[in-house]
Image: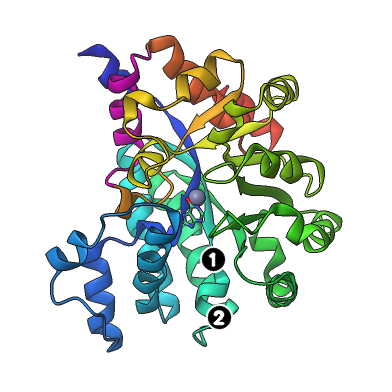
Protein backbone atom coordinates (compact mmCIF):
# COMPACT_ATOMS: atom_id res chain seq x y z
CA UNK A 1 0.00 0.00 0.00
CA UNK A 2 1.12 3.57 -0.65
CA UNK A 3 0.64 5.12 2.80
CA UNK A 4 2.89 2.68 4.72
CA UNK A 5 5.47 3.12 1.94
CA UNK A 6 5.30 6.92 2.31
CA UNK A 7 5.67 6.58 6.10
CA UNK A 8 8.71 4.35 5.75
CA UNK A 9 10.46 6.26 2.96
CA UNK A 10 9.93 9.87 3.99
CA UNK A 11 12.97 11.61 5.51
CA UNK A 12 12.37 12.34 9.18
CA UNK A 13 14.06 13.61 12.32
CA UNK A 14 13.94 11.73 15.61
CA UNK A 15 13.91 14.08 18.62
CA UNK A 16 12.96 11.76 21.49
CA UNK A 17 15.24 8.76 21.80
CA UNK A 18 17.05 7.75 24.99
CA UNK A 19 20.21 6.13 23.72
CA UNK A 20 20.25 3.74 26.70
CA UNK A 21 16.75 2.71 25.58
CA UNK A 22 18.13 1.54 22.23
CA UNK A 23 20.19 -1.18 23.92
CA UNK A 24 18.82 -4.42 22.48
CA UNK A 25 18.86 -7.56 24.68
CA UNK A 26 21.46 -9.16 22.37
CA UNK A 27 23.83 -6.22 22.92
CA UNK A 28 23.14 -6.25 26.68
CA UNK A 29 24.27 -9.88 26.76
CA UNK A 30 27.30 -9.24 24.54
CA UNK A 31 28.46 -6.30 26.68
CA UNK A 32 27.79 -8.18 29.93
CA UNK A 33 30.08 -10.93 28.67
CA UNK A 34 32.72 -8.53 27.32
CA UNK A 35 32.83 -6.64 30.64
CA UNK A 36 32.29 -9.54 33.06
CA UNK A 37 29.12 -7.93 34.44
CA UNK A 38 26.56 -10.31 35.97
CA UNK A 39 22.93 -9.82 34.93
CA UNK A 40 19.99 -11.64 36.55
CA UNK A 41 18.77 -13.25 33.30
CA UNK A 42 20.09 -16.43 31.70
CA UNK A 43 19.04 -15.81 28.11
CA UNK A 44 18.05 -13.08 25.70
CA UNK A 45 14.54 -14.57 25.65
CA UNK A 46 14.29 -14.52 29.44
CA UNK A 47 15.33 -10.85 29.48
CA UNK A 48 12.91 -9.94 26.70
CA UNK A 49 10.07 -11.68 28.48
CA UNK A 50 10.63 -9.34 31.46
CA UNK A 51 9.59 -6.44 29.19
CA UNK A 52 5.96 -6.45 30.33
CA UNK A 53 5.39 -3.03 31.81
CA UNK A 54 2.43 -1.61 33.71
CA UNK A 55 3.61 1.99 34.07
CA UNK A 56 6.70 4.20 33.70
CA UNK A 57 8.40 3.05 36.93
CA UNK A 58 8.09 -0.66 36.06
CA UNK A 59 9.99 0.13 32.85
CA UNK A 60 12.61 2.39 34.48
CA UNK A 61 13.66 -0.37 36.91
CA UNK A 62 14.55 -2.70 34.00
CA UNK A 63 15.98 0.11 31.85
CA UNK A 64 18.48 1.18 34.54
CA UNK A 65 19.43 -2.48 35.15
CA UNK A 66 20.09 -2.93 31.41
CA UNK A 67 22.35 0.13 31.33
CA UNK A 68 24.60 -1.42 34.01
CA UNK A 69 26.53 -3.38 31.36
CA UNK A 70 27.92 -0.12 29.87
CA UNK A 71 31.43 0.51 31.18
CA UNK A 72 33.87 1.62 28.49
CA UNK A 73 33.95 4.31 25.83
CA UNK A 74 33.68 1.57 23.21
CA UNK A 75 30.45 0.31 24.86
CA UNK A 76 28.83 3.73 24.47
CA UNK A 77 30.14 3.95 20.92
CA UNK A 78 28.80 0.51 20.00
CA UNK A 79 25.37 1.25 21.50
CA UNK A 80 25.00 4.53 19.60
CA UNK A 81 26.40 3.10 16.38
CA UNK A 82 23.84 0.27 16.46
CA UNK A 83 21.05 2.81 16.92
CA UNK A 84 22.29 5.03 14.07
CA UNK A 85 22.47 2.08 11.66
CA UNK A 86 18.92 1.08 12.59
CA UNK A 87 17.58 4.65 12.41
CA UNK A 88 19.15 5.21 8.98
CA UNK A 89 17.16 2.22 7.67
CA UNK A 90 14.00 4.04 8.76
CA UNK A 91 15.13 7.13 6.79
CA UNK A 92 15.92 9.12 9.91
CA UNK A 93 18.30 11.81 8.60
CA UNK A 94 18.69 13.82 11.80
CA UNK A 95 18.45 12.85 15.47
CA UNK A 96 18.94 14.46 18.87
CA UNK A 97 19.88 11.78 21.39
CA UNK A 98 19.09 11.87 25.09
CA UNK A 99 21.64 10.37 27.44
CA UNK A 100 21.47 9.90 31.21
CA UNK A 101 24.97 10.47 32.64
CA UNK A 102 23.89 9.99 36.27
CA UNK A 103 22.98 6.36 35.51
CA UNK A 104 26.64 5.84 34.67
CA UNK A 105 28.56 8.22 36.93
CA UNK A 106 26.76 6.66 39.93
CA UNK A 107 28.47 3.35 38.95
CA UNK A 108 31.91 4.93 38.65
CA UNK A 109 31.85 5.44 34.87
CA UNK A 110 33.20 8.91 34.09
CA UNK A 111 31.42 11.67 32.19
CA UNK A 112 34.41 11.66 29.83
CA UNK A 113 33.87 7.99 28.95
CA UNK A 114 30.17 8.51 28.26
CA UNK A 115 30.48 11.71 26.21
CA UNK A 116 33.55 10.60 24.24
CA UNK A 117 31.95 7.33 23.18
CA UNK A 118 28.64 8.92 22.17
CA UNK A 119 30.27 11.88 20.46
CA UNK A 120 32.59 9.70 18.38
CA UNK A 121 29.59 7.68 17.22
CA UNK A 122 27.80 10.93 16.25
CA UNK A 123 30.80 12.04 14.16
CA UNK A 124 31.01 8.66 12.41
CA UNK A 125 27.23 8.57 11.76
CA UNK A 126 27.53 11.76 9.73
CA UNK A 127 30.52 10.48 7.77
CA UNK A 128 29.31 6.90 7.20
CA UNK A 129 25.50 7.19 7.09
CA UNK A 130 24.89 10.86 6.27
CA UNK A 131 22.90 11.01 9.53
CA UNK A 132 23.39 14.16 11.59
CA UNK A 133 23.24 13.55 15.33
CA UNK A 134 23.65 15.67 18.43
CA UNK A 135 23.47 15.05 22.18
CA UNK A 136 21.01 16.23 24.85
CA UNK A 137 22.08 15.53 28.43
CA UNK A 138 19.19 14.65 30.75
CA UNK A 139 18.99 15.08 34.51
CA UNK A 140 17.27 12.27 36.40
CA UNK A 141 14.32 13.93 38.13
CA UNK A 142 14.05 11.31 40.92
CA UNK A 143 17.45 12.58 42.13
CA UNK A 144 18.06 15.98 43.76
CA UNK A 145 18.66 19.32 42.10
CA UNK A 146 22.02 19.35 43.90
CA UNK A 147 22.93 16.12 42.09
CA UNK A 148 21.90 17.73 38.80
CA UNK A 149 24.17 20.72 39.53
CA UNK A 150 27.10 18.35 40.19
CA UNK A 151 26.37 16.58 36.89
CA UNK A 152 26.28 19.90 35.02
CA UNK A 153 29.66 20.77 36.54
CA UNK A 154 31.13 17.46 35.32
CA UNK A 155 29.75 18.11 31.82
CA UNK A 156 31.12 21.63 31.39
CA UNK A 157 34.45 20.52 29.89
CA UNK A 158 32.35 18.84 27.13
CA UNK A 159 29.79 21.63 26.68
CA UNK A 160 30.64 22.06 22.98
CA UNK A 161 29.56 18.44 22.40
CA UNK A 162 26.16 18.86 24.08
CA UNK A 163 23.44 20.94 22.41
CA UNK A 164 20.79 20.77 25.07
CA UNK A 165 19.58 19.75 28.51
CA UNK A 166 16.56 17.55 29.28
CA UNK A 167 14.73 16.09 32.26
CA UNK A 168 13.62 12.46 32.48
CA UNK A 169 12.94 9.46 34.80
CA UNK A 170 9.98 9.12 37.20
CA UNK A 171 7.66 12.07 36.62
CA UNK A 172 4.88 11.95 39.21
CA UNK A 173 6.06 13.59 42.44
CA UNK A 174 9.07 15.16 40.69
CA UNK A 175 7.62 18.30 39.03
CA UNK A 176 9.71 20.43 36.68
CA UNK A 177 9.99 23.26 39.24
CA UNK A 178 12.15 20.97 41.43
CA UNK A 179 14.89 21.85 38.88
CA UNK A 180 14.22 25.57 38.42
CA UNK A 181 17.67 26.77 39.56
CA UNK A 182 19.72 24.29 37.53
CA UNK A 183 17.66 24.91 34.39
CA UNK A 184 18.12 28.68 34.86
CA UNK A 185 21.88 28.07 34.97
CA UNK A 186 21.75 25.88 31.83
CA UNK A 187 19.82 28.65 30.08
CA UNK A 188 22.52 31.19 31.00
CA UNK A 189 25.10 28.78 29.60
CA UNK A 190 23.28 28.82 26.25
CA UNK A 191 21.99 25.23 26.13
CA UNK A 192 18.72 24.38 24.41
CA UNK A 193 16.19 23.21 27.01
CA UNK A 194 13.59 20.42 26.89
CA UNK A 195 11.79 18.38 29.56
CA UNK A 196 9.59 15.32 29.82
CA UNK A 197 6.20 16.53 31.04
CA UNK A 198 2.64 15.25 30.78
CA UNK A 199 3.63 11.64 30.09
CA UNK A 200 2.03 10.30 33.28
CA UNK A 201 2.05 13.62 35.13
CA UNK A 202 -0.68 16.29 35.02
CA UNK A 203 -1.04 19.28 32.66
CA UNK A 204 0.26 21.43 35.55
CA UNK A 205 3.72 19.90 34.92
CA UNK A 206 3.58 21.01 31.28
CA UNK A 207 2.74 24.55 32.39
CA UNK A 208 5.69 24.70 34.81
CA UNK A 209 8.07 23.12 32.28
CA UNK A 210 7.15 26.02 29.97
CA UNK A 211 6.83 28.90 32.43
CA UNK A 212 9.36 27.99 35.15
CA UNK A 213 12.01 25.94 33.28
CA UNK A 214 11.39 27.83 30.01
CA UNK A 215 11.84 24.76 27.83
CA UNK A 216 11.57 24.97 24.02
CA UNK A 217 9.98 21.53 23.54
CA UNK A 218 7.85 19.22 25.69
CA UNK A 219 8.77 15.53 25.63
CA UNK A 220 5.56 13.43 25.51
CA UNK A 221 3.03 16.08 26.65
CA UNK A 222 0.08 13.83 25.76
CA UNK A 223 -1.75 14.69 29.02
CA UNK A 224 -2.05 18.28 27.73
CA UNK A 225 -5.31 17.39 25.98
CA UNK A 226 -6.97 17.40 29.43
CA UNK A 227 -6.46 21.20 29.69
CA UNK A 228 -8.07 23.39 27.01
CA UNK A 229 -6.12 26.53 28.00
CA UNK A 230 -2.85 24.61 27.79
CA UNK A 231 -3.80 23.30 24.33
CA UNK A 232 -4.37 26.88 23.15
CA UNK A 233 -0.98 27.94 24.57
CA UNK A 234 0.86 25.04 22.87
CA UNK A 235 -0.84 25.78 19.54
CA UNK A 236 -0.32 29.56 19.69
CA UNK A 237 3.37 29.31 20.56
CA UNK A 238 4.00 26.29 18.28
CA UNK A 239 5.61 24.46 21.22
CA UNK A 240 6.67 21.06 19.84
CA UNK A 241 5.52 17.87 21.56
CA UNK A 242 7.77 14.85 20.99
CA UNK A 243 5.11 12.13 21.16
CA UNK A 244 6.06 8.44 21.43
CA UNK A 245 3.00 6.28 20.61
CA UNK A 246 4.45 2.78 21.16
CA UNK A 247 6.00 3.94 24.44
CA UNK A 248 2.62 5.26 25.59
CA UNK A 249 1.04 1.94 24.59
CA UNK A 250 3.65 -0.23 26.37
CA UNK A 251 3.58 1.92 29.54
CA UNK A 252 -0.24 1.82 29.61
CA UNK A 253 -0.69 5.59 29.17
CA UNK A 254 -3.41 4.64 26.64
CA UNK A 255 -5.22 1.26 26.66
CA UNK A 256 -4.61 0.72 22.91
CA UNK A 257 -3.18 2.64 19.93
CA UNK A 258 -6.67 3.39 18.56
CA UNK A 259 -7.28 5.43 21.75
CA UNK A 260 -4.08 7.45 21.34
CA UNK A 261 -4.65 11.21 21.10
CA UNK A 262 -2.01 11.91 18.40
CA UNK A 263 -4.72 12.87 15.93
CA UNK A 264 -6.47 15.15 18.43
CA UNK A 265 -3.17 16.95 19.12
CA UNK A 266 -2.48 17.35 15.39
CA UNK A 267 -6.01 18.55 14.65
CA UNK A 268 -5.67 21.16 17.43
CA UNK A 269 -2.77 22.68 15.47
CA UNK A 270 0.05 21.55 17.75
CA UNK A 271 3.60 21.01 16.45
CA UNK A 272 3.48 17.27 17.13
CA UNK A 273 6.28 14.86 16.21
CA UNK A 274 6.45 11.04 16.33
CA UNK A 275 9.40 9.34 18.04
CA UNK A 276 10.46 5.97 19.47
CA UNK A 277 11.58 6.89 23.06
CA UNK A 278 13.18 3.53 24.05
CA UNK A 279 12.82 1.37 20.94
CA UNK A 280 14.61 -1.72 22.28
CA UNK A 281 12.08 -1.91 25.13
CA UNK A 282 8.88 -0.76 23.44
CA UNK A 283 8.95 -2.97 20.37
CA UNK A 284 9.55 -0.50 17.59
CA UNK A 285 11.84 2.03 15.97
CA UNK A 286 10.59 5.09 14.07
CA UNK A 287 8.83 3.40 11.18
CA UNK A 288 6.98 0.99 13.46
CA UNK A 289 5.74 3.97 15.47
CA UNK A 290 4.51 5.63 12.28
CA UNK A 291 2.94 2.62 10.56
CA UNK A 292 1.24 1.14 13.62
CA UNK A 293 -0.14 4.48 14.80
CA UNK A 294 -1.41 5.48 11.35
CA UNK A 295 -3.10 2.09 10.91
CA UNK A 296 -4.75 2.27 14.35
CA UNK A 297 -5.94 5.89 14.23
CA UNK A 298 -6.76 6.36 10.55
CA UNK A 299 -4.30 9.17 9.88
CA UNK A 300 -3.62 9.96 6.21
CA UNK A 301 -0.85 11.20 3.91
CA UNK A 302 -1.31 14.89 4.81
CA UNK A 303 -0.68 13.97 8.46
CA UNK A 304 2.50 12.15 7.45
CA UNK A 305 3.82 15.24 5.67
CA UNK A 306 2.89 17.44 8.64
CA UNK A 307 4.66 15.13 11.11
CA UNK A 308 7.82 14.97 9.00
CA UNK A 309 7.84 18.75 8.52
CA UNK A 310 7.23 19.28 12.25
CA UNK A 311 10.18 17.03 13.13
CA UNK A 312 12.59 19.31 11.25
CA UNK A 313 10.89 22.51 12.38
CA UNK A 314 11.12 21.35 16.02
CA UNK A 315 14.76 20.27 15.73
CA UNK A 316 17.75 22.26 16.93
CA UNK A 317 19.33 22.19 13.46
CA UNK A 318 20.64 25.64 12.42
CA UNK A 319 17.96 27.69 10.67
CA UNK A 320 20.01 27.86 7.47
CA UNK A 321 20.28 24.05 7.27
CA UNK A 322 16.63 23.55 8.24
CA UNK A 323 15.45 25.13 5.00
CA UNK A 324 16.87 22.14 3.13
CA UNK A 325 14.32 19.88 4.84
CA UNK A 326 11.19 22.02 5.33
N1 LIG B 1 10.01 8.89 30.53
C1 LIG B 1 10.80 9.22 31.54
N2 LIG B 1 12.04 8.80 31.64
C2 LIG B 1 12.53 8.01 30.69
C3 LIG B 1 11.75 7.63 29.62
C4 LIG B 1 10.44 8.11 29.53
O1 LIG B 1 9.65 7.85 28.59
N3 LIG B 1 12.53 6.83 28.84
C5 LIG B 1 13.74 6.76 29.43
N4 LIG B 1 13.75 7.46 30.55
ZN1 LIG C 1 11.49 9.70 26.98
Judge whether residue 289 is colored magenta. yes
Residue 322 image offset from top left, x and y in percent = 62, 30
Judge whether residue 295 is colored magenta. yes
From the viewer's perspective, tell me whether residue 290 is left or right of residue 214.
left
From the viewer's perspective, tell me whether residue 290 is left or right of residue 182.
left
- Secondary structure, magenta segment, majority class: helix
* Residue 316 seen from this side: no
In this picture, is 207 found above or below 106? Answer: above
Quadrant where the N terminus is found in the figure:
top left
State the mark number for residue 105: 2
Q: Quadrant of residue 7?
A: top left
Q: What residue is rendered at 82% in x and 54% in y? A: 187
Boundaries of the magenta span: 283-299
Quadrant where the C terminus is found in the figure:
top right
Q: What residue is rendered at 56% in x and 35% in y? A: 223
Q: Report how far apart the C-alphas of labels 1 and 2 lie in the structure.
A: 9 Å
* Residue 26 seen from this side: yes
Q: What residue is rendered at 27% in x and 60% in y? A: 24
Residue 141 image offset from top left, x and y in percent = 62, 63
Determine whether the residue tagged by mark 1 lies in a helix, strand or loop. loop
State the mark number for residue 51: none
Q: Nearer the viewer, residue 262 or 251?
A: 251
User: Within 8 Å: ligand 1 and the Cβ of disc 1?
Assistant: yes
In this picture, is 224 found above or below 294? Answer: below
Q: Quadrant of residue 74?
A: bottom left
Question: Is there CB contact under 8 Å for labels 1 and 2?
Answer: no
Residue 125 image offset from top left, x and y in percent = 43, 53
To which residue does mark 1 refer? 100
Q: What residue is rendered at 36% in x and 54% in y? A: 83
Earlier sequence position, callout 1 versus callout 2: 1
Residue 230 image offset from top left, x and y in percent = 70, 27
Amino acid sequence: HRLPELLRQMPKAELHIHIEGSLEPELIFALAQRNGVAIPYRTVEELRSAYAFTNLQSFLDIYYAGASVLLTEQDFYDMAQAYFARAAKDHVVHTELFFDPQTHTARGVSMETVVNGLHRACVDAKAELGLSASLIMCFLRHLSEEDAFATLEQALPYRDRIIGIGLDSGEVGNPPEKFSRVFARCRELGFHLVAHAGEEGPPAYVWTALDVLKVERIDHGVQSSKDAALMRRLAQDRIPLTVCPLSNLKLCVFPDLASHNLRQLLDAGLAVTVNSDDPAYFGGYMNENFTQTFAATGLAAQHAYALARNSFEASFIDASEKRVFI
